[in-house]
Image (tube, rainbow, N blue to C red):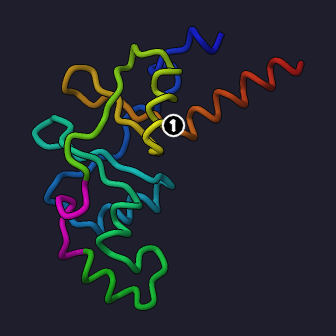
Amino acid sequence: MASKLRVRDCMAVDPATVGPRDSLQKVIELLRRRDIRSIPVIEEGKLVGIVTDRDIRQVAPAYPLFRDEAEIRRYTENLTVTAAMTADPMTVSPDAPLVQAAKVLETYRISALPVVDGQKLVGMISVTDLLRVFVEQNEEAEV
């Protein structure tokens, strides 16, 4: 069964996105609100990058352990997504076998991959999505 699953069967659809000129504070708020670790960066309808909680920590070292929330907020409101994002990120097709996405996530030690159909972002597939499938399949096998 697992070998038949495709990325489209397990991906999160309609992911949160940001633009390259948005503030890092907006990214931080989205990460917290959605309880996610990465957000695709879209410009003119095309995927141009990805920004992760790790990227933000590199440019705003106090994130997420704020000593002075107001000071950090001022700092991150003045930084744009471009300052932290990884441009031209690795992607996967919605029709790719799920195991292919898992291999990329494991090999590069990343937590999520944008799913693109041509140039269009259609979803995100994360380590958490893969673990959910693994748990579901193994619970079924125990019955």
Q: Residue at x 72, y 31 (%)?
A: 135
**61 vs 95: above or below:** below
Work out which quarter of the rendered image holds the C terminus and state it.
Answer: top right
- Badge 1 is on which residue? 106
| Left or right relative to 94: residue 126 | right
From which residue to which does the magenta span run? 77-85
**116 vs 82: above or below:** above
| Left or right relative to 30: residue 44 | left
**44 vs 66: above or below:** above
Tag 1: amino acid: Glu
Residue 61 place in picture, x, y as percent: 37, 77
| Left or right relative to 47: residue 15 | right
**129 vs 41: above or below:** above
Work out which quarter of the rendered image holds the N terminus and state it.
Answer: top right
Which quarter of the picture shows residue 77? bottom left
Q: Residue at x 82, y 18 (%)?
A: 141
Quick one: which residue is furthest to the right in this view? 143
Which is more toward the observer, 76 or 108? 108
| Left or right relative to 115: residue 47 | left
Q: Residue at x 25, y 83 (%)?
A: 74
- Labels in figure, total: 1
